[in-house]
């Protein structure tokens, strides 16, 4: 049985209710309250700073389109309190405010006396610490890959369409690029028609303190797990400290609200290019292809694949990175075949190559190996010279 990283939790939808029984109060989806960062309540300068921080963050966030960070400094560095509040980009000000107000109350109730905490809700998130975490995305910290939920609606399961990796992965790859590089709010939502009667809907968001490349990495991290390990489910929600993804087979957001939330904050010059500099820079060098490769000899084939190269990360031909990448790509097919999932890193920084491959649960070991190997070849030829790329096919993916 293929398993996920051990820290991933798979929880049925019944635990994902959005209101508490009898009250119209947002319910935390995730509460991180460490027990080893305690201060002495009532007698600490840190507490006074934290209180000041938490009482100001909801209003600050609402006043600046749903996102705020703040630092309350003290006489000494150990009294500092750092906080971040963010609402889902498509919710209105009153929903944002009531969600963040509830998060402040929940933190006080559920996490008293701790110097750091993170609470995540459907409509907002709140995080604070005595050390700065702004703009930090720890790509290699698997523990920060938080919550993973496959949603199966048992009632009416036959009527509810199940998610299919293809064409969902195409949508998710596009949404990741949009959220990371083309949205001021690091947010994107959209849909793809799977069959004439079935449409899949997706939404992705990063915390707005992340740099564009880190947002891209954070959201891309979800792709290999989704929906392979939620195969035949009707919805998936994944949360990381710095980003989140949701997909459903029904429209769970207002198209009008997400359209407004995705609009760039800076108005475009009349008739001009999109205002986000990195987006237009990237579009020029962006290589993206969809096409056909030789089918596998038997079983499910790799005939539909999607590769995406990120162009501003060139490496020197014949250099250390290239040889690290080549040995990485040659190691992944067999490693993935033996467990359905493989991660590896070759060489040392700054020329280290890091990769992961994942096969669908129902792919046999030979098909898995063959699929990953095919995508490795596609990436080697299609993304020559580039340090970062992702390839997705129906039976497997490689990054
Ligand atoms: C608290 O414990 C966690 C998990 O064991 C660890 O990663 C973290 O560094 C600890 N924090 C402090 C401040 O000791
Ligand atoms: C934050 O709190 C932890 C746990 O009490 C402590 O180990 C750490 O030194 C503190 N960090 C700063 C910058 O004071
Ligand atoms: C904000 O959104 C909520 C939920 O969609 C809705 O119930 C409420 O009426 C909206 N409030 C305003 C002021 O638009
Ligand atoms: C099941 O689906 C049918 C038709 O789509 C609908 O009328 C019915 O209310 C659903 N039942 C439940 C329990 O959701
Ligand atoms: C993703 O973007 C590519 C290139 O712009 C496009 O061809 C494809 O249709 C898009 N896929 C979805 C599902 O939107
Ligand atoms: C990367 O390589 C491409 C094609 O070889 C080239 O057009 C581009 O300018 C290079 N980018 C950088 C940042 O070196
Ligand atoms: C990682 O790749 C190296 C070759 O670059 C290989 O020797 C090693 O076995 C691989 N590790 C795993 C866990 O696959």
Image (spheres, grey):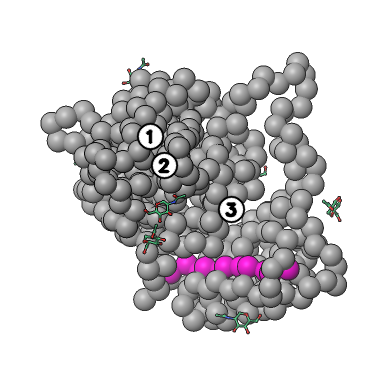
Please tell me in which quarter of the rendered image ligand 3 is found: top left
Above/below status of 258 relative to 1: above
Residue 32 in picture, x, y percent from top left: 33, 50
1 and 3 marks in contact (CB < 8 Å): no
Q: Is residue 370 visible?
A: no
Q: Which residue is mark 3?
A: 217
Residue, x 19% and y 36% (percent of image)?
Answer: 20
Residue range (magenta): 351-361
Residue lying at 72% horizontally and 66% vertically, measured from the top left: 350
Q: Are marks 2 and 1 in contact (CB under 8 Å)?
A: yes
In front here: 143 or 275? 143
The residue that mark 2 highlights is 79
Q: Of marks 2 and 3, which one's residue comes earlier in the chain? A: 2
- Nearest-to-viewer mark from 1 and 3: 1
Quadrant containing the C terminus is bottom right
Instruction: Residue 274 in the image: state x and y as whole percent.
Output: 72, 28
Q: Locate residue 380: give its quadrant.
A: bottom right
Q: What residue appears at the point 71 percent right and 72 percent down from the top-left corner?
A: 325
Cα–Cα gap, marks 2 and 3: 32 Å
Q: Secondary structure at mark 1?
A: helix
How far apart are the alpha carbons under marks 2 and 1? 7 Å
Residue matched to label 1 = 49
């Amino acid at each position: 049985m293929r398993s996920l990283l051990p820290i991933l939790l798979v929880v049925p939808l019944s635990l994902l209710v959005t209101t508490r029984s009898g009250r119209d109060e947002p319910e935390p989806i995730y509460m991180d309250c460490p027990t080893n960062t305690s201060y002495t309540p009532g007698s600490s300068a840190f507490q006074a700073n934290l209180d000041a921080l938490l009482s100001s963050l909801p209003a600050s966030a609402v006043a600046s389109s749903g996102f705020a960070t703040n630092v309350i400094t003290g006489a000494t560095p150990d009294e500092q309190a750092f906080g971040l509040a963010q609402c889902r980009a498509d919710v209105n000000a009153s929903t944002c405010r009531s969600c963040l107000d509830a998060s402040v109350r929940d933190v006080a109730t559920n996490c008293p006396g701790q110097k750091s905490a993170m609470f995540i809700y459907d409509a907002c998130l709140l995080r604070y610490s005595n050390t700065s975490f702004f703009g930090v995305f720890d790509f290699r910290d698997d523990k920060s890959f938080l919550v993973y939920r496959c949603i199966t609606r048992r009632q009416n399961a036959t009527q509810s369409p199940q998610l299919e990796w293809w064409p969902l992965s195409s949508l998710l790859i596009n949404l990741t690029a949009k959220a990371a590089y083309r949205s001021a709010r690091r947010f994107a939502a959209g849909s793809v028609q799977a069959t004439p009667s079935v449409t899949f809907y997706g939404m992705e968001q990063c915390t707005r303190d992340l740099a564009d490349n880190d947002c891209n990495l954070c959201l891309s991290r979800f792709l290999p797990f989704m929906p392979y390990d939620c195969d035949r489910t009707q919805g998936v929600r994944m949360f990381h400290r710095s980003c989140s993804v949701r997909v459903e087979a029904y429209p769970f957001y207002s198209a009008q609200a997400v359209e407004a939330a995705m609009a760039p904050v800076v108005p475009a010059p009349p008739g001009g290019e999109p205002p986000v500099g990195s987006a237009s820079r990237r579009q020029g060098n962006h290589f993206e292809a969809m096409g056909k490769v030789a089918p596998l000899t038997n079983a499910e084939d790799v005939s539909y694949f999607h590769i995406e190269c990120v162009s501003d990360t060139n490496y020197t031909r014949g250099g250390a990175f290239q040889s690290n990448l080549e040995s990485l790509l040659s190691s992944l097919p067999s490693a993935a075949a033996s467990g359905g999932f493989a991660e590896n890193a070759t060489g040392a920084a700054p020329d280290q190559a890091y990769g992961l491959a994942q096969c669908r649960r129902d792919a046999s070991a030979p098909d898995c190996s063959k699929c990953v190997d095919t995508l490795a070849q596609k990436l080697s030829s299609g993304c020559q010279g580039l340090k970062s790329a992702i390839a997705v096919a129906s039976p497997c993916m490689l990054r």
